[in-house]
Structures are given as structure tokens and as C-alpha cells.
Amino acid sequence: MSFSEDDQFTQVCIEDTGMGMSQEKANDLFKNRDLTSAIGTGKEKGTGIGAVLAKEFLEENNGKIWVDYSEEGKGTRICFKVPKQ
């Protein structure tokens, strides 16, 4: 996890070494409201609702979320930023 800030925003990035995802899936993850299910590292089934809720919450608070890096079999890095209050 990394954390940075400037005069206007606070940014947090979280990285894992899990399943990762294709570039296409990474590009589309936060672009729409469709739920995208996936099987996790521990064979658990995801529903995709976490991504949708995070995006909605951040956008309602003038923030942004994006996939900074992802590679299948190597993991994913997701970042978000929110304005300083």
C-alpha cells in the first residue's frame, strides 16, 4: 500500500499478488455499473459489487478510482484519490 498527497488530493494505492486480470478487464472494471464476477486466489467467487460501490462512493465525493496495473497471474494495483476537505 502506498499513500501520497498534494495540495488538493490524497491518493492511496493498494496492490496484491493474486490472480490479476487481463488488460481488457482492467480497462473496463470501473467504466460501467455492470457487476463482474471472478474467482479469487482462494477459489472464492466474487460478485463485483465492491468495485461498483467503491466507484459510486468515490465519485459522489469528487474522487476517482482506477486500475493502475494488473497482469494475469501476478496481481493488481488499484489506486484512488479523494479531494482534501
Image: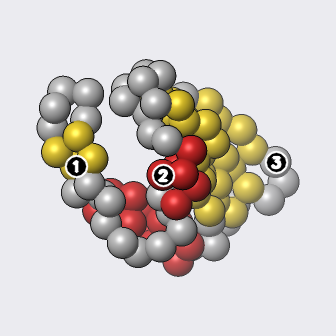
Q: Is residue 82 visible to the viewer in this orientation of the structure?
A: yes
Mark on residue 25?
2
Disc 1 to disc 3: CB gap under 8 Å: no
In front here: 8 or 58?
58
Provide the residue designation for mark 1: 46
Residue 62 in picture, x, y percent from top left = 63, 73
In front here: 48 or 15?
48
Mark on residue 36?
none
From the image, which quarter does the C terminus lie in? bottom right
- Quick one: label 2 or label 3, which is nearer the N terminus? 3
Amino acid type indicated by mark 1: Gly
In front here: 58 or 27?
27
Q: Secondary structure at mark 3?
A: loop
Q: What is the quadrant of residue 56 in the picture?
A: bottom left
CA gap, disc 2 and disc 3: 30 Å
> What residue is at 63 percent from the left and 42 percent from the top?
68
Q: What is the quadrant of residue 77 in the picture?
A: top right
Q: Which of pointers 2 and 1 indicates the residue nearer the eye?
A: 2
Q: Residue furthest left?
A: 44
> What residue is at 46 percent from the left and 30 percent from the top?
72
Provide the residue designation for mark 3: 6
